[in-house]
Amino acid sequence: MEENENPVLPRLLTNQSPSEDREKLNNPFRRDSRSLSPATLTPVSVGRYRAILVKDRPSNALMSRFPPGPKRIFPGSIFLRFRKNPLSFLEQMAHEFGNVSYLRLGRENIFFVNHPDFIRDVLVTNDHNFTKSRAFAHTRKLLGEGLLTSEGDFHRRQRRMIQPAFHSRRIAGFAEAMTKNAERMRSRWHDGATLDVLHQMMQLTLAVVAETLFGADLESEASEVGAVLSATMESLSTRMLPLGAMLAKLPLPGTRRMEACRAKLDEIVYRLINERRRSAREHDDLLQMLLIAQDEEDSTARMTDEQVRDEVMTIILAGQLTTANALSWTWYLLSKHPEVETRVHEELDRVLGSRPPLLADLKTLSYTEKVITESLRLYPPAWMTARRAVNDYKVAAYIAPARSIVMMSQYVMHRDARYFRDPLRFDPERWTPEFNVALPKYAYFPFGGGPRGCIGEGFARMEMILIVATLAQQWKLRLVPGHRVVPQPLIALRPKHGLSMTALRR
Ligand code: HEM
């Protein structure tokens, strides 16, 4: 590990001069004034950095409770800046304060960690000391006690029961549904037509998740379910902002519409569960797997209808928005990088010719896979992950008091020049086997990690490769001139104004 990668040093190190540091005292992103003031700073050379040591303090002075962070100019000023542009706010925090920084939002102590070792420590090693923060609290009404929102023993039991349904052997059977739905979509496109690609990808991933969950049962009412689900997802994704728990208390518009959608969805899902429980027919969809799932530690335990309903809603929510946005960003990047797109086309022509992709092709479509890996790096749909500490938690030289929120950002970490050379460049070729091995595990974590990591990672990767392959076999998408693409970090990172693109037949 190089000096500047040491997770502890950034508290000490800055490559700026003392005068710049003094300047920072007037800057909202200055170091913490409680521990540093101009009079106490002494520059010392450490490698190519200048260290700022705190004079006249015992050596354990570093064990202060709070790391440096942005300064509050007036009550609520940090919250407003964070809300205005969470991505650049977090990037600036990482740039300014290094691997661990601190901000206070309302009554919350928030520690922002920005080093793979610290991220692993929170998500994996010390997972038992954390709960999900309240970021998901306002989705609980829709999701109930599903995997995404539940905690502790209950979550562990549910995860044990549901995990086999996402085993690669099981999800292999869904490849056909993914390709078939993408084929249907590509046959509806017209040469030269303008498409809202985000909307198209939402429809496509919704169709895939609905078919893999409910199989044939849904065919008769697919359009009704599709409409209700789309409305739910749209209002959820536009309403949900970072720190939504705070915002959820405000009487925002759209709540009644959400409620109506939820009631309708409940009605449909409970009816499907009931019909299934009474039917003797064999099914091989996710709903069936949920209904027959057993706890390996208690083989008599099954899920109640309510639990199955909660998991169904969770799978829809967790699986659809994320994948739709990841695909949209991939089309955007391909349109901006025709040289990459050409290589994708070459691979598709070589491996598939004009036949649809099959499960067995996944291994061979290695360049297409790298494109998706790189797209998830630059535009990770899950752009931020947060946990709440149960007990005091030591991070680097600091103690996060119990109940603090520890925040990690995939978006910021994935663009860190310490791990990704030329980080803003879209470069699928960087994902060589050697690079993969050398990369610290949590420098790249689009699917989170540890016991609460994404259960649908294999599903999502397979879906994205098959959809990109099927659509790119026949179509190129080009951004409509003048259309502004602005990343907007809602529940998933999405293009704020959608993605207006022209479909061109290859
Ligand atoms: C590109 C697509 C996807 C991305 C980027 C993604 C990302 C994530 C991340 C980061 C988490 C962890 C959240 C946290 O730590 O707080 C997560 C959890 C989860 N994801 Fe995904 N996901 C994707 C697709 C899917 C799909 C397709 C499904 C299901 C079909 C799915 C189901 C879930 C579930 C159920 C959880 C909760 C797991 C638990 O807490 O036990 N995801 N996902």
Image (cartoon, rainbow, N blue to C red):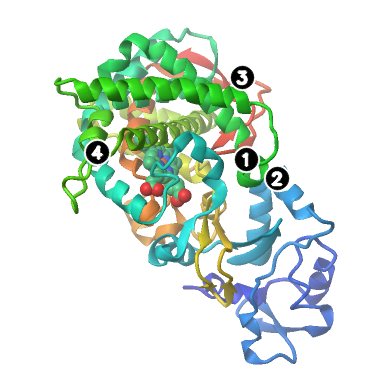
Residue 239 as seen in the image, left or right of residue 17 = left
Residue 134 position, x and y percent, is 55, 50
Identify the mark at residue 165; answer none if there is no mark.
4
Tell whether label 1 touches label 2 (CB within 8 Å). Answer: yes
Is residue 211 visible to the viewer in this orientation of the structure?
no
**Mark 1 crowd level (few <14, some 14–19, many ≥20, 10 Å Cα):** many
Relative vertical location of residue 459 with respect to residue 45 in this rendering, above or below:
above
| Foreground: disc 3 or disc 1 | 1
| Point 37% across, 61% down: residue | 438
Relative vertical location of residue 191 with respect to residue 379 in this rendering, above or below:
above
**Quadrant in which ligand 1 is drawn:** top left
| Point 63% across, 31% down: residue | 496
Tell whether label 3 touches label 4 (CB within 8 Å). Answer: no
| Point 36% across, 27% down: residue | 209
**Mark 3 crowd level (few <14, some 14–19, many ≥20, 10 Å Cα):** some
The answer to which of marks 3 and 2 sits earlier in the sequence is 2
Tell whether label 2 touches label 4 (CB within 8 Å). Answer: no
Residue 395 position, x and y percent, is 53, 72
Residue 412 as seen in the image, left or right of residue 311 = right
Disc 3 on helix, strand or loop?
loop
Quarter of the rendering containing residue 281: top left
Identify the mark at residue 241; answer none if there is no mark.
1
Give the residue pinned by disc 3: 480
The answer to which of marks 3 and 1 sits earlier in the sequence is 1
Give the residue pinned by disc 2: 83
**Mark 4 crowd level (few <14, some 14–19, many ≥20, 10 Å Cα):** some
- Could you tell me how far apart the alpha carbons at marks 4 and 1 are, in whole angstroms? 31 Å
- Could you tell me how far apart the alpha carbons at marks 3 and 2 are, in whole angstroms? 29 Å
Tell whether label 1 touches label 4 (CB within 8 Å). Answer: no
